[in-house]
Amino acid sequence: MFPPEAAFTRPKGGPDRIEQVFYSDRMAKEQLFELARRTFDTPEFRGIECIEVEAKSVINKVPGNAMPFDWTINPYRGCVHACVYCFARPTHTYLDMNAGRDFETKVVVKVNAPEVLRRELAAKRWKGEHIAMGTNTDPYQRIEGRYQLMRGIIRALADHRNPFSILTKGTLITRDVDLLVEAAEHAEVSAAFSIGTLDEDVWRSTEPGTPSPRARIEALRTLVDAGIPTGVLMAPILPGISDRPEQMRAVVEAALDAGASHVSPIMLHLRPGVREEFWPWLEQEHPELVERYADLYRKPYGPKAERDSLSSQVHRIIDRTPRRRDALAPRFRRSRRPQQQKAEQLTMW
């Protein structure tokens, strides 16, 4: 999804300017103008630096045809979820920061994202196409609790009746359920939670900055009860770590019991830049699996036979698991207005 080459300039005088130029079949630019760097002396934000920037545009064209969507919005760059396998880690190197600790602790915040989005949605050239969010870094990571950019973004999309979807690990999305319901009255709106496991030990080891998987299941239930079609991306499933039948069954059963519109399994993939960050963790936490992973991940996505086998196992579990009777098909369910929900993101440790 992300091109391998990028260029930056920092002109003398005036505010620092970070200019990112993606080179792809169709060149796209993202210009970020740095305003300030902030730290917050509260336990949940200790050690995290927020780099506040102004963006010239926020609706990004997805290069190539590899994704099932053409447009994205990412109000944040970097992510305090600190997932050891995160595929977005290499994008931080385009900003002259590293894919390891910098990615987890130096978050770029596009503070003007809602205002820029309104301008872009109102432009004659915009055709009201579907916009996917959460496709790079999580829009409902803990930083969102302070900056609250997503409320402005969803309000703009709702006002323009623009269809959109959100993928997240953040329970903070329930804060905006009132706006999601309003938006769904005039456009196709859906959500999905990334939940690869309910195993507490695996979760704490691989996703230390995220809300617990069971908290995500309850957030899923909240969205479904409000009439928002919400599924589960069962990802990533880690070979030898979270792929035991009972582990996968636990996720499927909990998701369908909460009313998930779908459950889609994805086996771990390790692209260049991610592999280098993941491997030291694997050697420390699961040295017995290093040889197996070296054999599995000669290529980033692992052997097709392994992926197909894992997918078949999960779909057999899905076929045998009862679904919630009132969970309707996503395209035909009419939303109803709830009261605004109060949600808190869990702390990192």
Image (tube, helix red, strand yellow):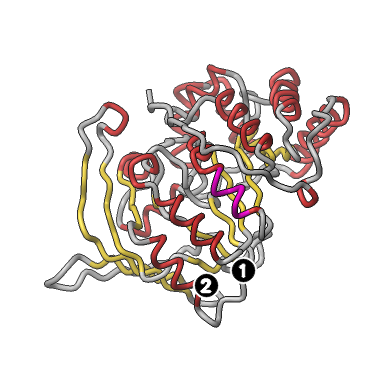
The reply to whether discs 1 and 2 touch (Cβ–Cβ < 8 Å) is yes
Quadrant in which the C terminus appears: top left
> Could you say which quadrant of the image residue 145 lies in?
top left
* Residue placed most toward the observer, 262 or 222: 222
Mark drawn on residue 24:
2
**What segment carries the magenta color?**
178-183
Q: Secondary structure at mark 1?
A: loop
Q: Secondary structure at mark 2?
A: loop
Few, some or many C-alpha atoms within 10 Å of disc 2 (few <14, some 14-19, many ≥20)? some
Q: Which residue is mark 1?
A: 64
Name the residue rendered at 74%, 48% in the picture: 334
First in sequence, mark 1 or 2: give its number.
Answer: 2
Q: Relative to 96, is 277 above or below?
A: above
The residues bearing labels 1 and 2 have C-alpha atoms spaced at a distance of 8 Å
The amino acid marked with disc number 2 is Ser
Asked whether 180 falls inside the magenta stretch, the response is yes
Residue 233 appears anywhere in the view: no
- Is 78 placed left or right of 298 in the picture? left
Q: Please identify the dominant SS of the magenta region.
A: helix
* Residue placed most toward the observer, 157 or 12: 157
Name the residue rendered at 44%, 72% in the picture: 119
- Is 1 placed left or right of 105 in the picture? right
Across and down, in percent, residue 154 comes to 51, 55
Residue that protrudes farthest toward the left in the picture: 13
